[in-house]
Image: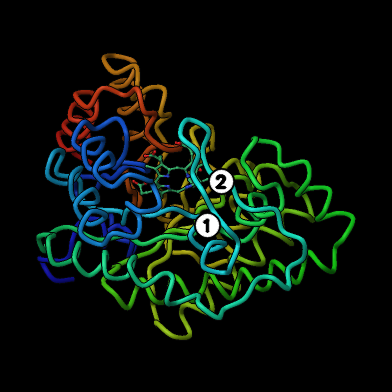
Amino acid sequence: MEKTTPLFLQALSGAVTKTAPIWLMRQAGRYLPEYREVRKKAGSFLNLCFSPELAAEVTLQPIRRFDFDAAIIFSDILVIPYALGQGLSFIEGEGPQLEPLKNFQELGFKNFEKKLLPGYEALRLTKAGLSRDKALIGFAGAPWTLACYMINSRGDGEFKKAVEYMREKKSEFSILIDLLCEAVAQHLIFQLRNGADAVQIFDSWAGLLSGDEFDLWVTAPAQKIVSRVREKIPGALIIGFPRQAGEKYVSYAKQTGVSAIGLDPVANLAQFSAKTCLQGNLSPESLLAGGDVMRLETERILNNTRNRPFIFNLGHGVIKETPPDNVAALVKIVRDFKR
Ligand code: CP3
């Protein structure tokens, strides 16, 4: 591999690197004063996502401040339902809210690409602003997690309405999941064609399912998406993050063929073959705490992943009260650790 290949892409391609590359989920966001300033200027969160210059700026902020190995494009998983025609708003202090769906016929691809274009321009601008040793990550929500928000209208951590719908209206639900597989694959392909070096599929609520339901609504859709993306872009680098998959992580990794697997804070690293690239899995609470708590946990993770391809990350997103100094200290610990 070329010397200039970003460390992050080396690890994602299966190399055991001398230091572990590091980036953090939600590395751009409200814990950074420079983000809060741009966010204020943008007005609404969606306006920030769809203003290419501003989105590129907040994507690059954490790279400048912390020198992470990869930038993740500033956007949200819910831009897919929005682009399929479901109204979306972000209510201050409450999080996202989607318009209630009467039926899935309201959804379609008519304006899909057009609505997402500003995000693709943000990717191109970001790419132009990144040095060659840094990688750019695109992303999308996985069908199951998107369906949770789309059916429930909002996030409540339980998504009872979505789970009930999945069980009682299985054939309609299956049609929705197929539509979302198509939408997610397209969105990932567009991102890869507009500057993303790799993409991550966020299945934040995968842990609500188990057994056959997990295989059907988490693993199978991810497998379908991976193969569709690679039909168009052979060898595309894809990270799968089926959060809280527990014992299902291994079969998910095997069946989907993802390039790396994102692990939540309690996932067991030992269950994977030594060839699988892992990503994670410091708890966001340890980063919030900082000091010895963070250092000991970080070193434990680094020690347990010495002889395998590995990307350092959190097991979930940065908590907004996290002191930026803790993040700087974390990057130093990871860089000073020789694998
Ligand atoms: O830095 C990055 O990681 C890239 C940007 C990013 C955001 N959301 C920005 C954001 C990414 C990758 C996401 C993914 C996302 N969005 C997920 C999957 C990951 C996860 O957290 O499980 C989910 C479930 C969402 C949906 C979503 N968006 C929720 C539930 C919320 C409200 C929670 C909150 O923190 O306010 C959002 C809003 C959101 N997305 C913010 C950011 C920076 C905060 C909005 C603001 O600045 O006011």
Horizontal and vertical percent for residue 94? 53, 33
Disc 2: residue Cβ within 8 A of ligand 1's nearest atom: yes
Disc on res. 203: none
Q: Which residue position holds label 1?
A: 141
Number of marks in the image? 2
The residue depicted at 26 percent of the width and 71 percent of the height is: 195
Local crowd size for mark 1, using a 10 Å CA cut-off: few (<14), some (14–19), many (≥20): many
Residue 114 lies in quadrant:
bottom left
Q: Are marks 1 and 2 in contact (CB under 8 Å)?
A: yes
The residue depicted at 13 percent of the width and 67 percent of the height is: 128
* 66 relative position to 100: left or right: left
Q: Amino acid at mark 1?
A: Gly
Disc 1: residue Cβ within 8 A of ligand 1's nearest atom: yes
* 259 relative position to 3: left or right: right
In the picture, the quarter occupied by the C terminus is top left
Horizontal and vertical percent for residue 163? 78, 48
